[in-house]
Every structure is written in structure tokens, then in C-alpha cells.
Amino acid sequence: MVSIEVRDAAVDFPIFDAKSRSLKKLVLGKVGGKIGTDSKVPIIEALRDITVSFKQGDRVGLVGHNGAGKSTLLRLLAGIYEPTRGSARIEGKVAPVFDLGVGMDPEISGYENIIIRGLYLGMTRKQMEERVDEIAEFTELGDYLSMPLRTYSTGMRVRLALGVVTSIDPEILLLDEGIGAVDAAFLEKARDRLTDLVKRSGMLIFASHSDEFLFELCNTAIWMDEGRIRMQGGLREVLTAYKGRDPLETLPPEVLDRIGEAPALSGNGEHA
Ligand SMILES: Nc1ncnc2c1ncn2[C@@H]1O[C@H](COP(=O)(O)OP(=O)(O)OP(=O)(O)O)[C@@H](O)[C@H]1O
């Protein structure tokens, strides 16, 4: 059974080479986690008092300013970071999709990279061999797939990576937004695959600054602020509180059409 239980978790980053002058500036800044200066070594308090529980079928968006703690929370849920305090229990096979390029080797071909990247995301070699033709077709990279990855442009690499990522069957899908480098037409093509991927996965936690993607993929949300959970509830309620306006007012009509009828504000968002 797929589940995540996090209790009173904190993640600290001690900074050993911080300079006091630049540190003062940081303390006054608006973005980022809190910087504690009580101890000799400054500590960035990236996550504080995190208690969350996710189950099969959850589709959760993570929103918040730059440095609010979204990526750190995703890394905690992936088991990449251990909580400094508290606990994080993750049951299920995690597919962390943080950096589309991770797990790719520039010296080997696109075809070989498809297999390698799939293995990195928890698939078996046999599963990837069965899918490689379909992924190749999706990327539209043609003969380039036989060339080493280092000969690809940024957008071409993203196409390959998106092709692989959207072909896997994850139990827990952790997605950090990083899909900006593809051109609009290709993103349009990837949209349906992304939606299908999310439907197939047991659980999705998605950090994003894009209302459009959040509405397409998630139904609930968590608002992170200075390393803490500020609010948790329905996606529309949380985004309305975070942005100070109803996000559906500014979404283009075609997106509203795609996500279905505008859901009524139920007002059941919980302030933490
Ligand atoms: N490896 C690290 N070492 C030190 N501090 C870090 C590290 N990673 C993150 N931080 C700090 O932790 C805090 C949370 O960062 P995080 O990357 O989780 O934010 P985010 O909400 O994902 O931001 P963004 O929207 O800009 O991606 C920030 O103050 C950041 O400076």
C-alpha cells in the first residue's frame, strides 16, 4: 500500500562558509527559509514542523515563494534528505523527477539513455526495452537517437527526458517543475502524456509555480511559507489564499475547458 507519513519533521542546512555581511542581507530578504544565527554556524531552517499524511490517489500541489521549502520537502519525501528532527515514513516505490537530465549520460546514444534513465526511475530493463520504440516516436528525434546525447540541444534533451519520464509506472511520483525549456507545441503534445502518467501513478506531489499545470494535475494543495506549512486544503482555496485572488479568473478559456467546469469554492481550506 502506498503511503507517506511525516511527523514534526525539520530539515536544517548548516552553512559553514557564510560571511556575516551577506548574511545580514539575507535575513532581511523576503524569500527563502529562515536563517538561524543562534549557534556559531548559521543554519538555514529549510523545513519546520512538517506534519503531513498522503495516501493512494492523492494529487497534491506544492505552492509558495522561491525558497519556501517546496523542493526540500520533495527531497525529504524521496528519502534523499533525512529529517534533522521528527520522522518521515514512505511506503511505495518513489520516482523522483526533479531534474529532467539526472541519470543521463552525455557520451551514450539517445536510445541507450532512454533505457538508463528508465532504470534510474525504478523500471526494469525489459520494461524499458518494450517501451523504447514508443518513446523514440514521441520525441520526434529521428536519427539523432543514435547519436551521443552531447550533440543534443537543451530542448532536445528535455524531449528525450520527458518521453522517458512520462512512460514509467510510478507508485509515488514526485515532480519538481522543470519543464520550461521545451517549445510550446511540444509541451502541448506532452500534456496528455503527463496527465496519463499522473492517472497511472498511485500518488503525486507536484511543486509548481504554474496555475495551469497545478489545475491539470492536482486537486489539493499545500502552501509552503518560510519552511512551514501555511495552509493545506482544496487547490483552488489554497491558491486563492496564496495569491490573494481566485486563480480561475486568469486561466485561459481553453484551460478552463480542459479542466472541466469551474469547481465551486467550498471554503474548506484549513489554515495551519
Ligand atoms: N543544499 C542546500 N544547502 C543550503 N541551503 C539550502 C539547500 N537547499 C535549499 N536550501 C535553502 O532551503 C530553503 C528552501 O529551499 P527550496 O529549494 O526547498 O525552496 P523552493 O520552495 O523549492 O524554492 P523555488 O520555488 O525557488 O524552487 C531556502 O532558504 C534555500 O536557500
Image (spheres, helix red, strand yellow):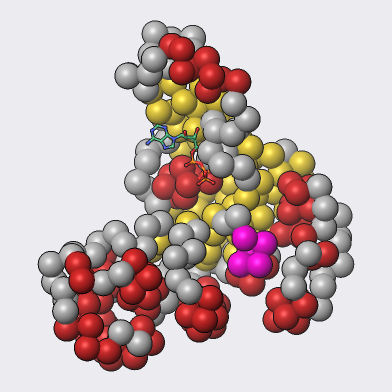
Magenta stretch contains residue 177: no
Name above or below for residue 38 compared with residue 18: above
Magenta stretch contains residue 212: yes
Name above or below for residue 200 compared with residue 140: above
Q: Is most of the magenta stretch helix, strand or loop?
A: helix
Find residue 236 and report its image quarter.
bottom right
Residue drawn 82% across the image and 58% down it: 246
Find residue 139 and report its image quarter.
bottom left
Q: How many marks?
A: 0
Q: Is residue 54 left or right of residue 220?
A: left
Q: Nearer the viewer, residue 175 or 267?
A: 175
Q: Nearer the viewer, residue 56 or 11?
A: 11
Specify the segment rendered in magenta. Answer: 210-214
- Quadrant of the frame with the C terminus: top right
Residue drawn 52% across the image and 81% down it: 185
Residue drawn 86% across the image and 60% down it: 266
Q: Nearer the viewer, residue 181 or 124?
A: 181
- Residue 268 shows in the view: no
